[in-house]
Image (cartoon, rainbow, N blue to C red):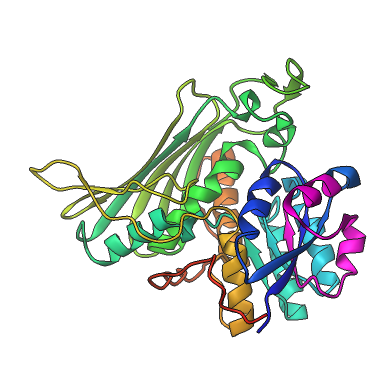
Amino acid sequence: MSPVGVGIVGAGVISQHYLKHLAKCPDVRVLHVSDVDVERAKAAAAEFGVPAAGTVAEQLAMPDVELVVNLTIPAAHAEVAAAALTAGKHVYGEKPLALDPAAGARLLALAAERGLRVGNAPDTFLGAGLQSARRALDDGVIGQPVSVATVVQGPGPEGWHPNPDFYYQLGGGPLFDMGPYYLTALIGMFGPVTRAVGTARRARERRVIGSGPRAGVEVAVDVATHVTALLDFADGLSAASTFSFDSSMSRTVIEIIGTEGTLSVPDPNRFDGPLRVHRVGGDWQDLPVTGSELGRGMGVVELARALRADRPHRASGELAGHVLDTMAAILDSAAHGEFRTVGSTVDRPAALPAGWDPTAATLEG
């Protein structure tokens, strides 16, 4: 029952969030940072007090590293995860699980064969905002949920990210980049998706980087940048969703219509609120938001504790695989103009217990 040793693969922008937050969580110990740019890995390790840094191979050879946190670009997710599993390590990866359902299924099969865990982002559904929304729904605050409308739109990441190329390659675009937040939130509240229909388009062939040392450089666009989808869930609820990098205006929406009101759910790319309810004849009212707002890395801690307790973890590879299957079904539908059945299912993750705190020390040193 000791803290779980963690290695970080990938010292890019997102690693800063994980390293900062995991440093506050005594149930995990970050022991090593690796990157194809070893100097970048060493700089990240020095900044956050991680004792070692170097290559991926060096990290995978460390016996004290039990869990590899894979923060590479989407095109490398499956390869790095498979290498970690082959080395006998559990894996927690950034989204998406893989570039396509077949690769995701191979990864989960490898983990099962070796008796290892796969966890995957996003873990935002473990945050105070979405856990409070789930509790409100389970308590019947809007009666029986009937339908959901979700929107995430904006001008695209090239305006703020210094190296946005991967956002416009296979495994990127608004569906694969932002879709996992929204789909994971919906599946966490309502269970699995059964079928999907979608449309997809690409507004521009190239994008221009707007910040950093590569400002002004053009990036090729290889994926759809505006996707709309209709989703059916196993419990009978339906959702209409828009994912876009083509809007001049940034907007995020999740509104759930029920038989007795409407629930406005927090941004699923965040861990906090607000959470509001509207009932017929009334005004919008704020609902309480309780739980942890630590940020990215909460899923790593929850997996680590589940590993020690020998129970299922919530941000699971199976959940990420179902999200991947749903996104693939949307794009396949868009290509063929027909509804597509989602080829997998998954149990709705259990709600977090009241007072769950990733910064508490629950594992003895």
Q: Position of residue 75 (x, y in %)?
A: 77, 46
Foreground of the two, 53 or 144: 53
Q: Residue furthest left?
A: 281
Q: Which residues are magenta?
A: 41-70
Q: Residue at 66% of width from left, 33% of height from top?
A: 223
Q: Quadrant of the C terminus?
A: bottom right
Task: Using residue 85 as the reference point, say whether residue 232 is left or right of it.
Answer: left
Q: Position of residue 315 (x, y in %)?
A: 56, 64
Could one spot residue 343 in this view of the protein?
Answer: no
Give the answer, above or below, for where 42 lies relative to 250: below
Task: Using residue 3 as the reference point, say whether residue 46 is left or right of it.
Answer: right
Foreground of the two, 134 or 323: 134
Foreground of the two, 190 or 238: 190
Could one spot residue 148 in this view of the protein?
Answer: yes
Residue 352 placement: quadrant: bottom left
Give the answer, above or below, for where 309 lies relative to 97: below
Q: Residue at 26% of width from left, 57% of height from top?
A: 145
Task: Using residue 54 as the reference point, say whether residue 272 is left or right of it.
Answer: left
Q: Residue at 70% of width from left, 41% of height from top?
A: 13
Q: Position of residue 37 (x, y in %)?
A: 88, 43
Specify whether residue 156 is painted magenta: no
